[in-house]
Amino acid sequence: MVKRATEENEFLGYRIDFEYRDDYFYALVSGSKDSLEAATNYWARMIEEAKSNGYMKMLVEEDFPNQGTTMDIFKHARELNQMFGPNFYVAHFDRHDEHYSENKFAEQVAFKERLQGRTFQSFEEAENWLLSIDIDDNIE
C-alpha cells in the first residue's frame, strides 16, 4: 500500500498531495492561482519532503489554471537549479496543455547545465522517463 499525505498552504493558496511510491516520490500540487512566491514555496517543500524520505527521483504533477509571467518563470527556474543539487531527478507534468511552452522554457533555464529534470506533455511520458533513470549509473 502506498503511503499518502496532504499539506495545504491557505495563505499562498495551494495544496500538495504526496505519495511515497516504491520507485519515486510523487507530488500533485494544485490551487486556484499560481504565483512566484507560491511556486518557490511548494517546490522547496516537495524537494525537502522527497529528500528527507530518501528519494532521489520525484514526479511532480501541476494543476493551476494560470502560469506566472515570463520573468517570474525565469526567476523561479534559476532558483530550481540550486534547489535540486546533484543526483536528484525530477519529471514534471502540467495538466494544462497551454502551459507546456512556458514549462519547457523553465526546463531549459533550470537544467541548462545538467539534465536532471524534464517537463512532459503526459503523465505516462514523465513516469517512463523517471523510471528509466538508474541512480547508481548517474552518481557524480
Image (cartoon, rainbow, N blue to C red):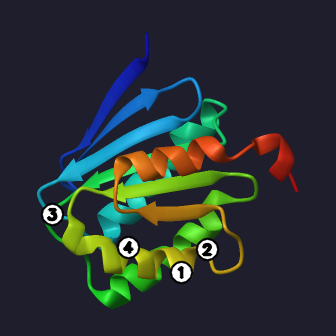
Q: Is 21 on the left-hand or right-hand side of 135?
A: left
Residue where numbered disc 3 is placed = 33
Residue where numbered disc 1 is placed = 108
Mark 4 vs mark 2: which is more N-terminal?
4
Camera-side residue of 97 and 81: 97
Q: Residues within 10 Å of mark 3 (few under 14, many from 20)?
A: some
Q: Tell me how far mark 4 sits from mark 2, CA to CA.
A: 12 Å
Q: Quadrant of residue 93?
A: bottom left
Q: Residue at x 63, y 36 (%)?
A: 55
Q: Quadrant of residue 102?
A: bottom left
- Tag 1: amino acid: Gln
Mark 3 vs mark 2: which is more N-terminal?
3
Q: Is residue 104 above or below residue 86?
A: below
Mark 3 vs mark 4: which is more N-terminal?
3
Tags 2 and 1 in contact by the CB under 8 Å rule?
yes
Q: Quadrant of residue 52?
A: top right
Q: Which secondary structure lies at badge 4?
A: helix
- Tag 3: amino acid: Lys
Q: Which secondary structure lies at badge 3?
A: loop
Q: Tell me how far mark 2 sits from mark 1, CA to CA.
A: 6 Å
Mark 3 vs mark 1: which is more N-terminal?
3
Q: Is residue 99 above or below residue 69?
A: above
